[in-house]
Every structure is written in structure tokens, then in C-alpha cells.
Amino acid sequence: MAFDALKKFFAEKILLPRVFRMDVPGYIVGKFYTFEGQSAFVRSIFMPEHFFTCLETRIEKKLGKNGLKRLYCVGKKFGWRFSELHHLSTKNVRNSVDLTANFLETLYAEKLSVNEVDVQKKWIQLETIELAITRVNNGGYALPIGAWAGVWAFLNRDLKLECALEKRKSSVHVLSAGPRELLKKSKKSFFECDLQPKAFSRNYATLNTPPTQITGGYVSLNSLLDSNFFNYEAGKLELKTPRERFVSTEVSLLYWLEEEFGDLVEEAAFECFSEIGKANKSNGSASLFLAHLLTALGFGLVDASEGRNKNVALKGFPCLDEKSNVCKQRFVQGATKGIYAGFGGSKAKLKKISTMFIDNKLAINLKLG
């Protein structure tokens, strides 16, 4: 078998089926295997594509170009973490590029091809068709533009490599990554971000591993796929009503977006999930719909009470490190309020949020009224 064919087989038949376990309620987890035989535990979540485009619109409107640069920097930091977490090899950059390109194509694009690689010059070009987020707004400053800058910087061990986006046709975009001087010579528009990678928590796997037994009638993503609530094909997860694509990401991106853009993250999540709630209000209970949706998307085991004063409890919420309990969880606040508003209720107000660790799992409790 030719080496390229072997890599494609490895990515499609061996790597990807193990990246996501979608049969565990509240958890999207798995292991990434490299050619060197290394493996890494990963906790992922699915977030609406519309959330990312809505967030970019709000950031640009309120914070301007500097806000988009900050968004790009979040993505670049995430790309570096993604590479480090997945043990991408820096010894053979070309092999890592091909493997990562196959992985990204399966998750984020209809087609992704490596057009040009010059390892000596630290230069690469990827051509994509129907690239997630970018296909909607010609943006994607955190994901995928900033993220690919971080991946390329990691593979070359050069913190100052950047990535630029170029639109070729309506659905075709090219990502060019390399040294700043080469991007300037090629007249690419790009942001400069001096990356400062963050250290990992040693307890990341412990904090995010599913419990051995889960009882209580919680739903998994697989169960909602079986009931045709979602469609999933070649790494593309779509909600049927309204038709909305969901994008997979490791949990750190969510935390760093909240850290950088708190209120705007909550506003974007509210807008997005209120539309989802409005399109599904004929399904009956807003609380049951909310609990099933967030549980299936990997946000832990979710219970939500009915009535005027609502209580939403999330057990085993995705956790970045031991300090995650001090975060304000702006995304899940916006999503929760949005679902209730979309189902026809008045905009719920947060009365209290409490967070704690129970059996090494992050638990969040929201009281709304």
C-alpha cells in the first residue's frame, strides 16, 4: 500500500473512529493515536457553527480590528494546545501535516488539500472547500485561521509563524501559514500574535473521564442520531431543525473564548440557542429539550426543572483544569437562557450560579427565574 493511501486509511479507519466516543451520555471523549504509537485522552464538545459567526460579528462591531486580533490569538493558542495534546510529531513535519490535514478534512471541510509545503522556509498552503465557519462569513479568526497558525507554529517550534486566509471562489478558501516576512511579501492580510502557550493540568484526564456507571435516563449523542434528531456524516454533525451545523472542538477553546470575551460569548450563545429553541418549541418541554441537547453535545449530565423558577444542574461539565470552578460559564448561561426564550417564555434571569467539584468532576448549578 502506498504511503499516502496508508495515511488516509489510518485517518479514516483507525484514528477517527476513536477520536469521538459518542455513545456516552454527557461526554464526547476518545483517544488520538499517532504513527509513533502514542495516545492522548481528549475531551471534546460540539458547538453551533452559528455561534462562532455570531460571536465574530459582535466582536468586530464592539471591539473592531483589535477584537478580531484577540480572537485570532485565542485560536492560535488553541492550535498549539491541540498539537501538543495530540502529540503531533515535530521530527517529521511533512508526515504530521498530512495526518493533520486528513483529520481536519474529515471534521471541518468537504475537501482539504495540501497545495504547497516548504519545510525549510516554514511555509504551507492548504486549499479548502466548504470550510466550517469560514464558508459562512469568510472569517473564522479563532477556528480555523488562528488554530492552523498554532498548529503550524507548533510543528516548526516557532511561536511567530502566522496564518492568512484568502478567498478564491464562493466555497474555496486557501490558508497560507508561514513567517511574517513571507506573508508580507505575498501581500497577505494577517494578524501578528506573539504566542504564549499554557501548561497542561496533570489531572485533565481524571477531571474529564466519564464515570464507570451512568444512570438516570440521560441521552447520548448516538441516541439522538438514532432518533434522527441529528445527522452525522464524515465528521459533519447537523441538527435537523433548524438545519444547523455543529463544530467539534477540544474544551480549552470554550474556556479561552469566555476568558477573553465573556459578555459577548453569552450574547452570541443566547442568540444562537434562542433560534434553536424557537424552531423546536412544538416538542413540548423546554427543560427536557435543553437537558437532552446539552447532554448529547458533551456538556455533562444535565437535569433541568420545570416551573417559573428553574434549576439547571450540569454534572461532569467539561473541565480545563482545577481552576475551572471559578469560571462564570458564560456559554452555558447564554445557551440555557436562549432555549427557554426560544420556547416562548420571557427571558430568564440568572439568580445564582454555583460550581464545585464532586468526585473529581465539575458540577454547575444555575438558578433562573
Image: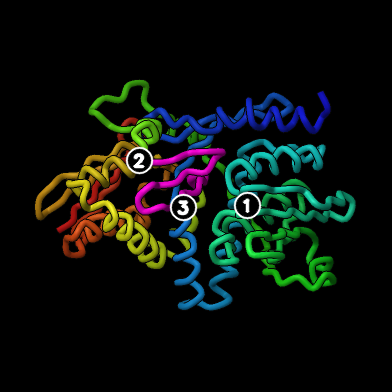
Question: Mark 3 or mark 2, which is nearer the start of the sequence?
Answer: 2
Please tell me whether residue 243 belongs to the stretch shown in magenta.
yes
Residue 107: numbered disc: none
| Disc 2 target residue | 229
Marks 2 & 3, CB-CB < 8 Å contact: no
Mark 2 crowd level (few <14, some 14–19, many ≥20, 10 Å Cα): some
Q: Is residue 334 visible?
A: no
Amino acid type at image mark 2: Phe
Query: Marks 1 and 2, Cα distance to the nearest angstrom?
Result: 38 Å
Is residue 121 in the magenta section?
no
Quarter occupied by the N terminus: top right
Disc number for residue 197: 1
Q: Is residue 16 above or below residue 229?
A: above
Q: What separation in Å lies between label 1 and label 3 (alpha carbons)?
A: 16 Å
Location of the C terminus by quadrant is: bottom left
Other residues around mark 3 within 10 Å, as few (<14) / some (14–19) / many (≥20) = many
Relative to 136, residue 185 above or below: below
Is tag 1's residue or tag 2's residue first in the polypeptide sequence?
1
Image disc number at residue 254: 3
Residue under the point 32% across and 60% down: 275
Task: Give residue 210's position: percent from left, percent from top.
Answer: 40, 29
Magenta highlight range: 230-251
Disc 1 or 3, which lies upstream in sequence?
1
| SS at badge 1 | loop
Distance in Å between CA atoms under marks 2 and 3? 24 Å
Task: Tell me if label 1 and label 2 are in contact, CB under 8 Å.
Answer: no
Quarter location, residue 182: bottom right
Q: Residue at x 68, y 63 (%)?
A: 194
Residue positioned 48% across, 71% down in the render:
57
